[in-house]
Amino acid sequence: MRYKGPLPKRVTGRVNAWMVGLRASPRWGRWVRGRLTVVTYTGRRSGRSFSTPVAYRRAADVVTIAVAMPERKQWWRNFTGEGGPISLDLDGADRAGHAVARVDDKGRVTITVRLVEPPAGSSR
């Protein structure tokens, strides 16, 4: 029988640190940043701030995140229902947005982020 619980924190911590390092790499970063971003959000129960690397697709001001192995992860649940605020590192700048998680009939989870325009006069 396969393990279906959450991934061990020591494993996810190492993988996430490696992915963030790869994204910042002078050699590989420019290729990785086009598909990998770091999202920052506030936990729904703890109120603490968390950051995690995720793969994404972008079309104008809409970012789509397909959550891999959602049954083993908890972070996406912060965006169920009406969703919530999120920050993404895109094009070298933090962009604010509103994220909503949807679960399809096969259990796949997709988070749709609508980016918020920065205030007038600020740089991206």
Image (tube, rainbow, N blue to C red):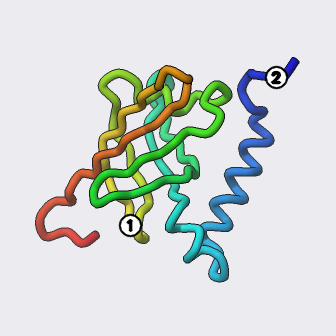
Q: Secondary structure at mark 2?
A: loop
Q: Secondary structure at mark 1?
A: strand
Taking depth in this image into account, of 46 and 29 the one nearest to the observer is 29
Among the two numbered marks 2 and 1 on one chain, the one whose residue lies closer to the N terminus: 2
Report crowding for label 1: few under 14, some 14 to 19, many 20 or more residues within 10 A (C-alpha).
few
Residue at 42 percent of width and 31 percent of height = 101
Name the spot of residue 38 as percent of width and height, x first.
Answer: 52, 54
Q: How far separated are the C-alphas under marks 2 and 1?
A: 38 Å
Residue 64 to residue 7: above or below = below
Query: In the rendered image, which residue does mark 2 sit on?
Result: 3
The residue positioned farthest toward the right in the image shown = 1
Residue 115 to residue 90: above or below = above
For the image, the number of numbered tags is 2
Residue at 42 percent of width and 28 percent of height = 102
Residue 72 to residue 28: above or below = above
The residue positioned farthest toward the left in the image shown = 120
Query: In the rendered image, which residue does mark 1 sit on?
Result: 93
Residue at 41 percent of width and 70 percent of height = 91
Classify the position of the N terminus by image quarter: top right
Type of the residue with mark 2:
Tyr
Asked where in the image residue 60 lies, by quadrant, the reply is: bottom left
